[in-house]
Image: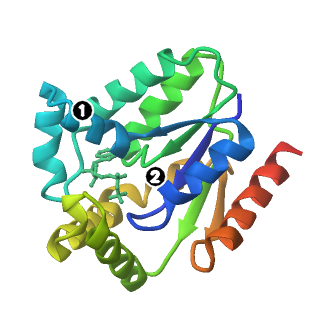
Amino acid sequence: MFNLILFGPPGSGKGTQSEKLIEKFGLIHLSTGDLLRKEIANQTQLGLEAKSFMDKGQLVPDEVVIGMIGSALDANPAAKGFLFDGFPRTTAQAEALDTLLTGKGSEISLVLALEVGEEELVARLLNRGKTSSRSDDRDENVIRQRLEEYRKKTAIVADHYAKFNKVSKVKGEGSIDEIFGSLAAEIDKKRA
Ligand code: ADP
């Protein structure tokens, strides 16, 4: 299996690039943000609980997202590989993911870290908020809180994988196709 983590702050383009990467490399896309929004749309208990955190720009508790990812892995036994988008977001999530993959005789192959400046991130998210149905993109305070959570809890997740030499940094500013080209080149290097 080829298992990829697309890493980076909110607004760095993970969703956009994920769509292109899964198509080119035949991976299954696992976005915890999308999975949580589906739970909210279906008005499940899990969705109701998660919504209160998401509306404030806070991370949803680890056990909730780890459980969701565990079920998604089990639901796709024949996968060639997975693309994790928006997960893991804490060191505890990273360790849990390693354990889940080890249990399936696999591991993370590569972490691609998108780098985008903070003011550019805020501008992109506010812009997305004008047209998307996502309420967490419409309020600048919620956006700043998400970036704060990223700095405090998520940025260090890259260090966890850097210990195993699995992280490649990619400039996340430029055209969508340019950035996609850089990401794809890193994957090709790793698979060669
Ligand atoms: P973005 O990265 O642009 O903020 P996402 O769709 O990835 O958007 O996440 C939206 C919200 O969902 C986050 O602010 C957080 O509340 C919650 N969330 C998503 N993934 C996780 C995760 N792995 N751990 C905890 N909370 C998460």
Question: Is ligand 1 closer than 8 angstroms to the Cβ of mark 1?
Answer: no
- Colour scheme of the picture: rainbow
Task: Give the camera-side residue of 151 and 10.
Answer: 10
Is there a contact, CB below 8 Å, between mark 1 and mark 2? no
Decide: few, some or many residues near mark 2? Use Cα within 10 Å; few <14, some 14-19, many ≥20: many
Dot 2 amino acid type: Val
In what quadrant of the picture does the N terminus appear? top right
Q: Name the residue under label 1.
A: 39
**Quadrant location of residue 80?**
top right
Decide: few, some or many residues near mark 1? Use Cα within 10 Å; few <14, some 14-19, many ≥20: some
How far across and how far down the image is residue 91, in percent?
40, 45
In what quadrant of the picture does the C terminus appear? top right
Q: Mark 2 points at which residue?
A: 157
Q: Which of marks 1 and 2 is nearer the N terminus?
A: 1
How far across and how far down the image is residue 16, in percent?
52, 58
Decide: is 69 above or below 18: above
How far across and how far down the image is residue 88, in percent?
43, 43
Q: Nearer the viewer, mark 1 or mark 2?
A: 1
Task: Give the camera-side residue of 30 and 176.
Answer: 176
The residue drawn where x is 52% and y is 31% is: 98
Asked which secondary structure carries label 1, the reply is helix
The residue drawn where x is 50% and y is 24% is: 99
